[in-house]
Each structure stands twice: as structure tokens, then as C-alpha cells.
Amino acid sequence: MKETNTLTDPSKLPLLNRLSPRQYEVLAYLAAGGWNTLFGIGLYALAYRLFGEKVHYLLLAVPVNIAAITNAFCCYKLFVFRTEGNWLREYLRCYLVYGGGSLAGMGLLWLFTELFGMSPAYANILGTAVVVTASYFGHKYFSFARRGTR
């Protein structure tokens, strides 16, 4: 009986090692997005618990969103797109993609609810799916674009 070597038999490699670079990037993007969602929700809950009696709940969202976008930027830069570009330029571009995504999400929520008669909950899910997909390409080809990919 012949023994297989884990270094030469792809079926013996861990899943992440068998992914193509594009598959890894998409999976890492979704994982980073999931982490960032939990981070933002948890940070807002903490801020509200600590300061909710003294600070309006909408004002609390400002520093929390800055922290969440900064967290997302670091995850995307270091683990998803793994770029070596200018940190400040990429950070500001990341903010533009997030701002555009936020506006698009609100617009899609209105469109799906008012024009197509969807319930707001389902409209939000569909709009989020569209924005997440568009944001991936926005970050890939704008925020973290490598030379020659723009």
C-alpha cells in the first residue's frame, strides 16, 4: 500500500491552500466583512451602554463608524488584498467606497420598497447583497488597486 505525501497530494492539503488566489480573496473579503459587522455592532453596543444616557444615539454612531471603517480597512489591506500601497491614500479611497455604498444602500432600500413593493426587511437584504458585491469590486479596483488594475 502506497502512502501519499501531504506536500504532493492536493487532496491532503488544508482547504485554504487549495483555493485559487481569487477564491481566497473573495472568501477573505466575506470573512473580513463578517468580522467587521460583529465588531461594529459590539462597539456600538458598548458605546451605547457607556455613554447612551449622556450622548444621543445617532452621535454615538459617528465615532463607532469611524472605528468600524478603520477596522475594515486594516482587514482588507492586510488580509484580503494584501497591498503595499500608500496607507493614507488607500484609507481615504476606502472611505469613498464605504460612503458610496451607504448612499447606494439607502437608494436601493427606497427603490425596492417604494417602486417594487418589497417589505423593507427583504429590500434591505437584497440591497445589502448588491452593495457588498459592488463594494468588493470598488475596494479591489479603487481602494486597493495595484498598478495596472485600474
Image: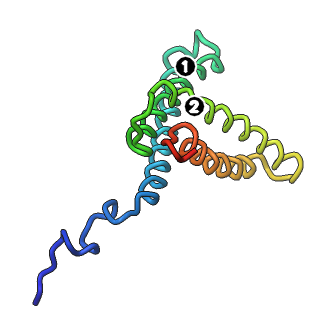
- The kind of residue tagged 2 is Arg
Looking at the picture, tell me which residue is in the foreground, 100 or 119: 100
Of all residues shown, which one is farthest toward the bottom? 1
Callout 1: SS: helix
Position of 36 with respect to 132 (left or right) is: left
C-beta proximity under 8 Å, tags 1 and 2: no
* Residue 114 image point, x, y percent: 88, 46
**Residue 115 vertical position relative to residue 42 in the rendered view, above or below:** below
- The quadrant in which the C terminus is found is top right
Name the front one of labels 1 and 2.
2
Instruction: Mark 1: give few (<14), some (14-19) or many (20+) Cα within 10 Å.
Output: few
Residue at x-position 87% and y-position 52%: 117
Residue at x-position 49% and y-position 50%: 30
Between the residue at mark 1 and the residue at mark 2, the CA separation in whole angstroms equals: 19 Å
**Image mark for residue 48:** none
Position of 12 with respect to 71 (left or right) is: left
Position of 61 with respect to 42 (left or right) is: right
**Image mark for residue 63:** 1
Callout 2: SS: helix
- The quadrant in which the N terminus is found is bottom left
Instruction: Mark 2: give few (<14), some (14-19) or many (20+) Cα within 10 Å.
Output: some
Mark 1 or mark 2: which comes first in sequence? 1
- The kind of residue tagged 1 is Pro
Of all residues shown, which one is farthest toward the front? 148
Which residue is identified by label 2? 93
* Residue 120 image point, x, y percent: 77, 46
Residue at x-position 57% and y-position 31%: 93
Position of 91 with respect to 135 (left or right) is: left
* Residue 148 image point, x, y percent: 52, 46
Residue at x-position 43% and y-position 45%: 80
* Residue 82 image point, x, y percent: 40, 42
